[in-house]
Each structure stands twice: as structure tokens, then as C-alpha cells.
Amino acid sequence: MGKPAFPAGFLWGTSTSAHQVEGGNENNDWSEWEKQPGRIRDGTTSAEACRWWNGSAEEDLATAASLCQNAHRLSVEWSRLEPEPGRWDDAAFARYLRLLAEMRRLGIRAMVTLHHVTLPRWVAARGGWLARDIVSLFARYAEECIRRLGGSVDHWVTINEPASVAGAAYVSRYWPPALGSVRAGLRALGAMLEAHAAAYGAMKRVHPAASVGIVLSTPRFEPARTGSRMDTLICAAQDWVFIGSLLRALRTGTLLPPLAGPARPPGLRRSLDFLGANYYGQYAVRFDPLLHERLFGRHVQEPTVRAGECDWGQISPEGLTRQLVRLSAMEVPLYVTENGIHDAADAIRPAFLTDHVAAVHEAIRRGADVRGYFHWSLLDNFEWAEGWQPRFGLIEVDPVTQKRTLRPSAHLYARICGSNGATASGRERASQGSP
């Protein structure tokens, strides 16, 4: 096929998160969780991770720049910046400033996430996202970050995947605090939306022109049996709780059931300058009357790659196109902030990558204002409760020796980034045996 050109100024990058790559994070809720037997599927811990805190970040980002990437999405670690309530760590802020300065020198634009899964221990001890003062605490943290780092950041993300955090940590027992309560999960989800709104307002008061948004997980939900009324109903219910209710809340400023919290949190309406979409595939939803924690819907798709309990969906580039077109109704710029696949052998990733880039282009052709694509991830890292076993990186990392090896897909993505498009479909490239 001919080369699908993307808009001028399109951002081509990769994503990481602080706890997954920095190493040495010993003051957040995950640091103790990882040490508890059975919590991490492969028995590993984040430990040194990818040693980003101690200097490897600059080297890896230089590699990204050499591969024609012009943007990177990373997160800052709240527990480093505010190790105790109200005490800010100047040295930690200085470390992030140096990293952001190096990104600018390399020609890499920065998208910075304030909350990517982890919470400081002292916040977790107060109840985490159920704490009485969590909204004001998060807004204070956001304000301090933009005050100190704002001049070096192109785009800010308040919270990454609030529904995923609420589901894995509060509804189920997959992540800390492992409450196993649907009610707690809905309360936490409402609190995250309220905290997002408060953070957005605080950041805009400091820097009115700042670009501030939120990132949602946006899988495609489809009934497992097209003729089943129950599959269709439960599929719609899962989509509403996980995506639809959040979009409506952000658009109208109103929390509708099942979201818990104040009916109209201050400042929630239109509290986003852009929307980030994390997309890992499509779920086939089958009615299951015993599975209450997933709203009585079991995911029965047969994904190409599955790791442990991680519920990554079935590969579906078309689903990404459809979700981006759907999200365009929010009438704000869109970014694909995560899209990737667990593939240590790099056998599937080349076709996956090129087909999903083509899917983004198709969404743009259909009118979606998509302005960037961030592949997950730049390099292999600690994948939460699954440990080091899932390998998502364009760069292979040995967590013991820290040796880096570029996978063939890294070079493929470099050609996409450098040409601002793609020259062949992933299936064509894979059939030709070309990386």
C-alpha cells in the first residue's frame, strides 16, 4: 500500500512509568507489596528496575532519539517528590529537571504523568484513593509539580487509567490495597475523577496555558455471542463503567451511577485539554452470573499473547480506529498514550506495530484529531503483578546485567517515525520476513 502520511508535527514516541523503570523506589505502596510472597507472579521485584534514577534514563532516551522518536511519555514518582506529608525533596525535583532538560536537548518532547499506579506509603496508610483528604493532597502535589517542572513539560497527564486502578486495587485483590470490594472500587474511581478536576484547576492557576489531560484505558468491548441478549447487556454495562461513565463525567461534570462521590465535583466539566487513550485490544464478553467483580461478564477472547492474569485483549487494530473515532466526540486533541504487546521473541510485534499505526491513520482519515502515538514501551520493564515475565520493549533488557539489545521492531518503528508514516502493512512486512 502507499505511504499513509500523518499530520505535520505528529508526535512519535514511547511510554514508560517511574516505578517500572527507575529502580530504588522504596517509599510507595508497591515497595512492600512486591516483597509479600505470591503477590508477583514470577517472584521478582522491581528492585533496580532499568536504573533510570541512577543515570540509565539519559542513555535510553538518547537511543530513542537516534531511532527518530520525537516525544516520550514518562511519569514522576510522588513518593520521591513528597516523601512525607508537606515535605518536598529538592534533590528529587532536581533529578527530574535534569532528565527533562536532557530530553529537550535530544529533541524529545515530554508528556509527564503525575500518577501512574503507585502512591506514597503515607498516602496509602491514610486509605489511598479512599482517604478523606486525597483530593486536596493530590491537587497540592500537582500544583507543586507544575510550579517546579512546568517550564520543561509539553503535556501533563494527571492520572493514568483510573478505572484500571480502581478495578485491580479496590474491586479485586490484584494490586494493593487489594480490598476486593466493588463499592470501594466505585468510590475510588469517583475520587480519582474528583482529584483530577482539582489538580487540573490547581495547575491551570499556576500556568494557564499548560496542556493538561487525563489518560483512560479504552479497550473495545464486544459481545462474545452476537445473538445473546445477556452478552450484549453485560458488554454494554462493562463499557459504561470502564469508559462511558468517565467520558460523560468529563464532558458534563456530573457523576452518574455507578460512580460514587459528589454529584458535580467542582471543576470536573471539560477539565481536559487533551485525552490520552491506552489501547491493548478487544474483549469478548460472555455473561457469567458468578463473576460479580466483573459485572457478571467473563472475557473469553483468545488473545495471541497472554501473560498470567493480565487481561490483555485480542489483537484488533480496527478496534483502535473505532475507539479513537468514538473519543473524538470529546472535541479535544487525542493521543494514543499506550499501545503494545508482550512479545519477547519480537515475532508478532512488527505486524502489530505497523497495523496499529495504520489504524491510527484511518481514525485520522475519519476525522479524529489524533496528534501523537506512544508505543508501550521503550524498553522491557517491571510489569506490576506479572513481574519481569511480560516483555513489551522495543529494547530488550536483561534485569540482572542491565544489558540493552535493540529488537528488530525498534528499527521498524524508527522507519515509521522518521518517515512520519508507514510504508507497508504489518502483515505484508511479516510475510516478507522483514523487521
Image (spheres, helix red, strand yellow):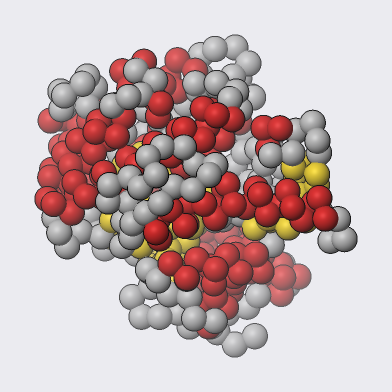
Specify the quadrant that holds the C terminus: bottom right
Residue name at image x 43 percent, y 57 percent: 276
Residue 35: x percent and y percent?
51, 14
Q: Please, which residue is most extreme toward the bottom here?
A: 2
170 relative position to 316: left or right: left
Residue located 57% across and 59% down the image: 409
In front of the other: 231 or 333: 231
Question: Is any part of residue 44 visible from this angle?
Answer: no
Residue 258 in view (yes/no)? yes
- Is 171 or 84 nearer to us in this picture? 171
Q: Is residue 21 left or right of residue 35?
A: left
**Depicted 366 relative to depicted 207: above or below:** below
Task: Please identify the quadrant where the N terminus is shown.
Answer: bottom right
Residue nearer the viewer, 242 or 61: 242
- In the displayed structure, 174 sits above or below 431; it is above
Spot occupied by residue 82 in the image (x, y as percentages of width and height): 22, 27
Location of residue 20 in the rendering, given as x and y in whole percent from the top left corner: 44, 35
Q: Nearer the viewer, residue 430 or 340?
A: 340
- Answer left or right for 15 relative to 94: right
Can you tell which quarter of the image residue 316 is in?
bottom right
Residue 363: x and y, percent?
54, 75
Q: Residue extending furthest front?
A: 263
Instruction: Name which residue lies at 21% across and 50% down.
Output: 201
Picture quadrant of residue 236: bottom right
Residue for point 45% across, 15% down: 32
